[in-house]
Amino acid sequence: MPELSDKVTMKGNPVTLEGNEVQIGADAPNVTLTANDLSAFELSSLKGKTVILSVVPSLDTGICDLQSKRFNTEAAGLGDGVAIVTISMDLPFAQKRWCADTGSDKLMFLSDHKAGAFGEAYGLMIKGARLLARAVMIVDADGILRYRQIVPEIAQEPDYEDALRALKEIA
C-alpha cells in the first residue's frame, strides 16, 4: 500500500498516511461505508449532488466535535444540491449517539470502521493508529474530486473559509 510521510503531524509528531492519494480532477473512488443504521452505503449513490466529505479522526475529540458542528451549521444554507458527509472510524453507534447529543441533523455520518476502505482509497489512513487524517474534500455532481484539503496538523481545525469558497465555485 502506498505511504505518504511528509504531509501530516499529530500534536507536532509526523505521521504516515497509507493509501492512494486521489488527485484533483480524478474520479472520486467509490467505497462502501456503514450508515448509522448499520446498512451499507455506497458513496457513489450521492452522484448528482455536490458532496463535501468532512473527514475526522473521532467525533469524541474536541476538534472533530467543532468541525462537525461547524459543517452542520453551514449545511443549513447550502440547499438541496449539496450534501455534507462526515466520515470517521467511529462505530456507527458512537456516531448516532454524537448526533443525538449535539442535535446535529443536517449532516450524514458514515463509518469506515469495518475495512478502512475509505481511508485506503483516499490516502487518509494513519499508519498504526487505524484513524483517518483530518481532511475536507469536495466531489462535484459528476463524481469528480474538485477540492482536497488535508489538514497538516490533525489537532487543528480545517480552513473552513477556503473549503466554502471552493464549494461556491464548484456547486
Image (cartoon, grey):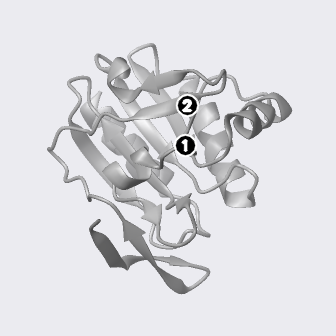
Q: Nearer the viewer, mark 1 or mark 2?
A: 1
The quarter in which the N terminus is drawn is: bottom left
In the image, residue 106 lies at what x, y percent? 62, 23
**Most distant residue in the left direction:** 25
Q: Secondary structure at mark 1?
A: loop
Image coordinates for residue 162, horizontal then vertical, percent: 39, 52
Tell which circle, 1 or 2, labels the residue nearer the N-terminal end.
2
Q: Which mark is residue 62?
A: none
* Mark seen at residue 114: 1
Task: Estimate the x, y position of residue 88 in percent, counting from the top left.
Answer: 57, 47
Extreme residue toward the top, this view: 80
Which residue is the extreme one toward the bottom? 13
Q: Is residue 59 left or right of residue 82?
A: right
Q: Which residue occupies 20% across, 24% down?
A: 142
Residue 140, image x, y percentages: 26, 30
Q: Residue at x 53, y 73 (%)?
A: 128
Q: Is residue 139 above or below residue 17?
A: above
66 left or right, relative to 48: right
The image quadrant where one finds the C terminus is top left
Determine whether 131 is above or below 8 in the image.
above
Look at label 1 and name its amino acid: Lys
> To which residue does mark 2 refer?
34
Residue 116 is left or right of residue 2, and the answer is: right
Identified at 47% across, 24% down, the residue is 41
Mark 1 near mark 2, Cβ–Cβ under 8 Å?
Answer: yes
Residue type of the residue flagged with mark 2: Thr
Tally of numbered tags: 2
Q: Does the rendering let one see residue 108?
A: no
* Disc 1 crowd, CA 10 A, few/some/many (<14, 14-19, 20+): few
Residue 82, quarter of picture: top left
